[in-house]
Image (tube, helix red, strand yellow):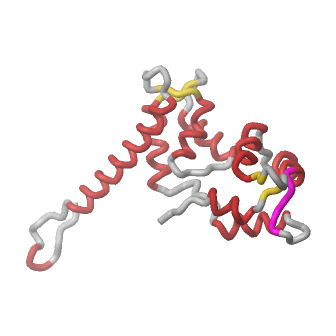
């Protein structure tokens, strides 16, 4: 434990350690609460397929590859299809403390959409977006595509006005 110099050199400083312990306890509480939403059997386990939803609900946005790496750290040696809270909690606590898997900044998202908008008209058609997101890079699943379109698509024009969509989905980090 560190000590102060000067007049109070014999007084131990415990505040920073207390604050860190309190911060970790609050993070662990958030993780447990998010985990419990998906713990349908109330036995401190969740279906492995729910881990992505839990991680995203905690403000982390890993790629599929990063999610698989995280799963490898928390799965049993003989995978059961379930993840135990006792294995998930320390791994996810470290993820949150390290601020891993942060969301993509708004300007980067805008630049990506603008690159897809060949006519520079401020929108992308549903067909174009589905093609890009299911055939290029890390493809969206059908469910992910449906989720995105349910939020992003203007049903009257069958287009995605990407500036509006970005403003709806960007996470405020402040």
- Rendered location of residue 57, percent (x, y): 53, 45
- Rendered location of residue 11, percent (x, y): 11, 67
Left or right of residue 87, residue 82 in this image? right
In the image shown, does 91 or 54 lie closer to the viewer? Answer: 54
Q: Is residue 95 visible?
A: yes
In the image shown, does 81 or 159 lie closer to the viewer? Answer: 159
- Rendered location of residue 64, percent (x, y): 69, 44
In the image shown, does 173 or 81 lie closer to the viewer? Answer: 173
Left or right of residue 24, residue 105 in this image? right
Q: Could you tell me which residue is drawn at 35 percent across and 48 percent down?
A: 26
In the depicted structure, whether residue 7 falls above or below residue 37:
below
Extreme residue toward the front, this view: 156
Figure quadrant of residue 55: top right
Q: Could you tell me which residue is drawn at 64 percent across and 47 percent down?
A: 66
Quadrant of the drawing holding the N terminus:
bottom left
Extreme residue toward the bottom, this view: 6
Q: Could you tell me which residue is drawn at 43 percent across and 22 percent down?
A: 43
Which range of residues does the magenta coloring cover? 122-126
Figure quadrant of residue 163: bottom right
Q: Could you tell me which residue is drawn at 44 percent across and 54 percent down?
A: 97
In the image shown, does 149 or 172 lie closer to the viewer? Answer: 149
Q: Is residue 124 magenta?
A: yes
């Amino acid at each position: 434990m560190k000590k102060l110099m000067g007049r109070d050199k014999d007084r131990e400083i415990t505040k920073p350690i207390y604050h860190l312990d309190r911060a970790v306890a609050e993070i662990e509480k958030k993780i447990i609460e998010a985990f419990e939403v998906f713990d349908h059997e109330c036995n401190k386990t969740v279906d492995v397929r729910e881990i992505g939803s839990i991680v995203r609900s905690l403000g982390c946005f890993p790629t599929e590859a990063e999610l698989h790496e995280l799963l490898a750290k928390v799965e049993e040696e003989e995978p059961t299809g379930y993840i135990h809270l006792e294995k998930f909690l320390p791994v996810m606590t470290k993820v949150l403390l390290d601020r891993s898997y942060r969301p993509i900044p708004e300007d980067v998202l805008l630049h990506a959409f603008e690159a897809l908008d060949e006519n520079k008209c401020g929108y992308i058609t549903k067909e174009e977006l589905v093609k890009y997101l299911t055939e290029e890079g890390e493809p969206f699943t059908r469910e992910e595509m449906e989720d995105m379109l349910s939020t992003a698509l203007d049903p009257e024009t069958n287009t995605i006005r990407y500036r509006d969509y970005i403003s709806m989905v960007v996470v405020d980090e402040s």
